[in-house]
Image (tube, helix red, strand yellow):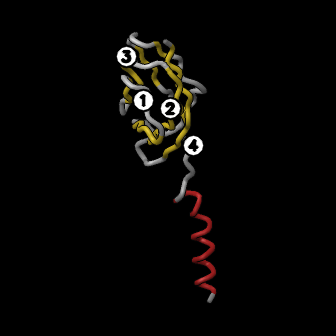
Amino acid sequence: MKKVVLLGLLFLALTPIAYATCNIDIIDEFITPFQVGVPGSFTFTPCCGTPPYTFTLYAGPLPPGLTLSAGGTISGTPTTAGESIICVTVTDSVGCHVTKCFYIMVNP
């Protein structure tokens, strides 16, 4: 019985080492506006994870004419004015990830 208790305490002591918390983030608060017919780009800034980072679109369509690269850059030439909300996930090389949502404005 004592061995079981000792092993249990050992596992509890090692748990923080085995399951380190992820602290990855996207530090941007907003996306700069785009303009219809004008090529533009915006690059997200990841923080605090383990590079390299991969970005994916989690929810919401990007405005027509814009794409998101795996490196975290939204680029292209918007074709339609309007507003939308997108959610972007960044994942680091050890599998930590975070998803943040952003408002995108395309001016006429």
Residue designated by label 3: 77
Q: Is residue 24 above or below residue 4?
A: above
Residue 98 picture location, percent across and down: 53, 43
Residue designated by label 4: 23
Give the SS element for disc 2: strand
Residue 72 picture location, percent across and down: 42, 29
Residue 68 picture location, percent across and down: 39, 29
Residue designated by label 1: 72
The residue depicted at 60 percent of the width and 27 percent of the height is 29
Given contact means CB atoms under 8 Å apart, are the residues at marks 2 and 1 in contact?
yes
Q: Marks 3 and 1: which is nearer the front?
A: 3
Q: Earlier in the sequence, mark 2 or mark 1?
A: 2
Q: Amino acid at mark 4?
A: Asn
Q: Earlier in the sequence, mark 1 or mark 4?
A: 4
Give the SS element for disc 1: loop
Q: Amino acid at mark 2?
A: Pro
